[in-house]
Amino acid sequence: MPVWSELLGHLKGRECHALEVGVFEGRSSVWLLENILTHPASTLTVVDTFVGGAEHAATDLTDLEARFRANTAAHAAKLVVRKGRSEAMLRELPLGRYDFVSIDGSHEAADVLSDAVLSWPLVKPGWLVCFDDYEWWIDAAPERSPKLAIDAFLATMRGRCEVVRKGWQAWVKKVV
């Protein structure tokens, strides 16, 4: 969270709108709502299937949505929950609305690339996208991790974005 505070702290107390693709139990959602989206008119739109990803195949997640809603209940008035697959849900959101987008849904490269491409027009120019799990590696096949997709997206968007920070997370500023 120190990186989030550093890069998003200037939004605290200002009306702003954020989008999270992939929220799991909502811990980052709660942090954003309590530390950044503090203005009464600020909102957080979240997109998730609430069934987990391939890495959760052996985990019982039947109560995942209920855990998310319980964790975020104190901030329900600022939440817009879009339950479903991101490739459908992101197409329904308003263009140029968001000051910040966090992409942390599926870890499959094809899904991450789709989330990046569909989220990009939703971000206001001059604002940030955070790709989580850039260095995450659970499978030897590169198409099973976010890095391949993030690198492909950044190469494609060269000149339209600026890499602000790259480590476990890749932070990108939308230039154009």
Image (tube, grey):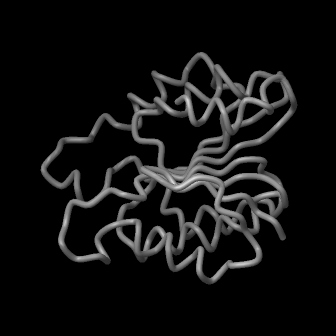
Residue 104 drawn at (x, y percent) = 47, 52
Is 27 positioned to the left or the right of 34 in the image? Answer: left
* Figure disc tally: 0
Q: Residue furthest bottom?
A: 156
Residue furthest top as drawn: 74
Give x and y (percent) for residue 55: 22, 56
Percent x, y for residue 161?
73, 68
Q: Quadrant of the C terminus?
A: bottom right
Q: Residue at x 40, y 53 (%)?
A: 133
Q: Residue at x 71, y 52 (%)?
A: 128
Q: Residue extending furthest left?
A: 58
Looking at the image, residue 113 lies above or below residue 16:
below
Q: Residue at x 60, y 16 (%)?
A: 74
Q: Quadrant of residue 134?
A: bottom left
Q: In the rendered view, tell whether residue 136 sits above or below residue 1.
A: below
Q: Position of residue 27 (x, y in %)?
A: 46, 29
Question: Camera-side residue: 55 or 79?
Answer: 55
Q: Is residue 31 above or below residue 48?
A: above
Residue 90 placement: quadrant: bottom right
Q: Nearer the viewer, residue 106 or 84?
A: 106
Could you tell whether 59 is left or right of 173 in the image? left
Residue at the spot x=50%, y=57% of the render?
84
